[in-house]
Amino acid sequence: MAPAGGPDAAFAAFQYGADAVYLGMQEFSARADAENFSLDALNEITAFAHSLAPRRRVYLALNTLILDREMPAALDQAARAADLGVDALIVQDAGLAGTVRRHFPNLRLHASTQMAVHNRAGVEHLRDLGFARATLARELTLDEIRDIATVDGIEIETFVHGALCVCYSGLCLYSSLASGRSGNRGRCAYLCRDRFAAGDGAERGDGAFRFSMKDLALPGLVGDLEAAGVDSIKIEGRKKSPLYVAAVTNFYRRLLDGPVAPADRRTMEQDLQSIFSRPWTTLFAAGRDNADLVDPDYVGHRGTPVGRVEAVSRRSGRTLLQFTTGRPVERHDGIQVDVPGSDRPFGFPVDHLFLAAEDRRPPREVFESHAGDRIEVELPDDAPELPVGATVYSASSQDVKRRYRFERPKPGLHRVRRTVDVTVGLAAEGLSATARLAPRYPGEAAVEASISLAEPLSPARNPHGTEEAVRRAFEKLGDTHLAAGTLTLDDPSGLFAPASRLNDLRRQLTAALEKEREAALSASVARICAELAPPVAAAAAGAEGAEFWRIKIDRPGVLDAFEPADLDGVAEVVFDIGFSDPAAVCADVGRLAALVGRDRVRLALPVIARAWDTEALQASIERLLRDGWARWEISNLSGWRFLPDESLDLCGGWPLYAMNRAAVRQWLAWGLSSVALSPEDGRNNLAALLTGYDARADVTVFEDVPLFLSETRACAIGGGTAPSECGRSCEIPLVSSKGGETLQICRRGRMALLNRAPFCLAGRLDELRALGARRFRAAFVWRPYEPAEVRDLWRSLRSGHAPTPHTVGSFDRGLG
């Protein structure tokens, strides 16, 4: 499956072998700043794909979190996708997924990688919810993928190429909390691709690109993925050019169809790298001990290496770079050279190219050179010092551009057309016609329109010719989105109707039908939105209920300094068992219960549970269930499979996102007793969610919210300890080149990046209460707090005082 950031990229993908493309429209796409598709462009590419043999597929990515006020527009987009017959929706938002599943059963649902599904249990639950395909987290190993692919009843999709985020997709709040640009809404500011200096007192601007990931590239594992039972391999790149899409699609198509000669494979790799490429990595596909993940020295496009700097010299007023090229170079190509100390390689166009002579004759200017030639390229006036031995890259190639040309169909040639059945009546006083669009799936209403034209009609000289004239007139549907179905003529008197009037009748009828079709679609969306209104009973319960506080911890002794009065008003203490030693977990829980009371304790599953975590986690769960612990918090879709007993009380924690009331409603319908509203949300959207669901929705008041959760740890930066051997805990202060102060925490082989200033809305408690909030959360997790520190923080929070420093995230500015 290939990316299509715009129509040209889609046409290029299909020409070079894509079985399917995925694309976004102007809203609700996880690549909001890609070109994206208009409705007309989506119509055209869907019709084009379905016209090919074999039939190709189009998947619409509605894969962002949707604010409450945006749900009508998102459902309208889904309704239009269903109307056009796109092959699937790729979704992240639970509210959208559940609503589409109920109301548009003709639309297949694919779970976006933004849903952070990373284990067999999560995939099994997606299947149970009705998803047709799961796009797995990029961090999985081949062994994990191989096991997951044996799950029946759901297709498995994995990424094989493209940009990587240091964080699990869907779990990154860095851009959102720092700038209001939510990665979960397609507006990531890419703050991770910055320099970070490590250590107390570090100066901004120093340090390495410690979180700037290399690009995923798994050409060597395509056969293994296919043998493992993977149904679809996916290429990232909706912000890339059509040229890139053509080259990368061709590369993986050839590998799938194989075998490919080594020389051809190397040429295709170099072609692709010259268009756009960071250094490549296999991430963890070949094993979790890979430490070759990050490019700490440079960001952005590098190109394909073609040589090394041999000399920089002056001649005839020109500064010339000399190197022996490993690939053809011609005028108007682009060259880049690594420059130590710079964030990016130095790039420039080849305006003047010289071929060095073997003897003492002066180099001669040429238009093109060949692999193996010793060449000189004129440098621009602003060129920095280029050290001898520095790598020279081909960063743009005219030859490559010529090699991956593609064709575009004639505009207007391809349209999705809906079959229309027409009845035409001829009577002495005039003409009439009725058109009908039959429903295509349960719940879809038929659409009808009727038109009459007053026109005295006389008997036909050739009654048999009337039917043919009517047929010719009503088959002229080229400028509509309709296709001729059955045509019935009601002409008992054998009348004649002029062709001009039949054409008028057709034009007015099709216009009326299109208008009715649009009205029916809008009415359908309005009905669905009305059904999503929260129950009145929920609002009443919230207004009458007492204030409810949850405290969440991940170490059993963190509340040891609490006094009995500190627990007044605390309904629950949630304990994350993910960091407990499985052999000690029951003792840890018992210790907490002795301190706060068994009736207050709720246990939480970790957000991430990889294959190597699962056996121990399941053993811990079984022990705790045997001990009678029946209240749990889950923060990933896998939680339902780890805790399948329907008698258990399950609540939802971050990141089971609830950014709209449809999502809250859906999580509750799927069995949760309450949800945690996202800490990245803003005031206005929170107010909407609390309208009707204040008794079932927790608002986070304090937490060291992970800016991201990652399998890439400090030990992977520049090599070092194998990740599977990294069991230590570490805490590394960082400062970015922009001055952002963060804390890198590693615990039990997993890394979180925290803001040094915790997220805190304690100073807004009265405002939150005025918005309708009745349930609050304070989480003391990840950061190694001392018990007395937690006690003092808790007392301040309860009294409405926030610590200094702190951040309110996007609470005031809201999310764009």
Image (cartoon, grey):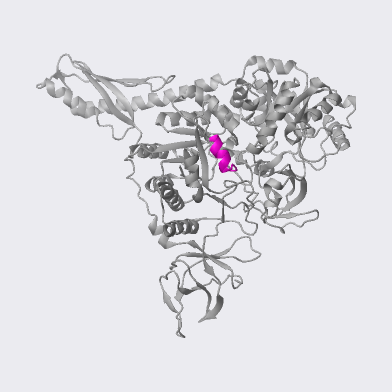
Residue 290 forms part of the magenta stretch = no
Measuring from the top left, give residue 21's x and y in whole percent: 44, 41
As drawn, the residue found furthest toward the bottom would be 360
Q: Residue at left 20%, top 25%?
A: 470
Measuring from the top left, give residue 318's x and y in whole percent: 52, 77
Measuring from the top left, give residue 10's x and y in whole percent: 42, 44
Judge from the rendering whether residue 387 lies leftward or rightward of residue 14; answer left or right.
right
* Residue 682 visible within the image: no
Q: Residue at left 52%, top 66%?
A: 348
> Residue 640 sits in which quadrant?
top right
> Residue 206 sits in which quadrant?
bottom right
Q: In the picture, which quadrant includes the N terminus?
A: top left
Q: Residue at left 63%, top 46%?
A: 288
Using the image as rendered, state which of residue 715 and residue 743 is in the foreground: 715
Using the image as rendered, state which of residue 615 and residue 275 is in the foreground: 615
* Residue 362 visible within the image: yes
Residue 143 forms part of the magenta stretch = yes
As drawn, the residue found furthest toward the left would be 461
Q: Is residue 410 above or below residue 555?
A: below
Q: Is residue 400 above or below residue 418?
A: below
Q: Is residue 106 above or below residue 198?
A: above
Q: In the picture, which quadrant includes the C terminus?
A: top right
Q: What is the span of residues highlighted in magenta in the rendered image?
A: 136-148
Measuring from the top left, give residue 361's x and y in whole percent: 45, 85
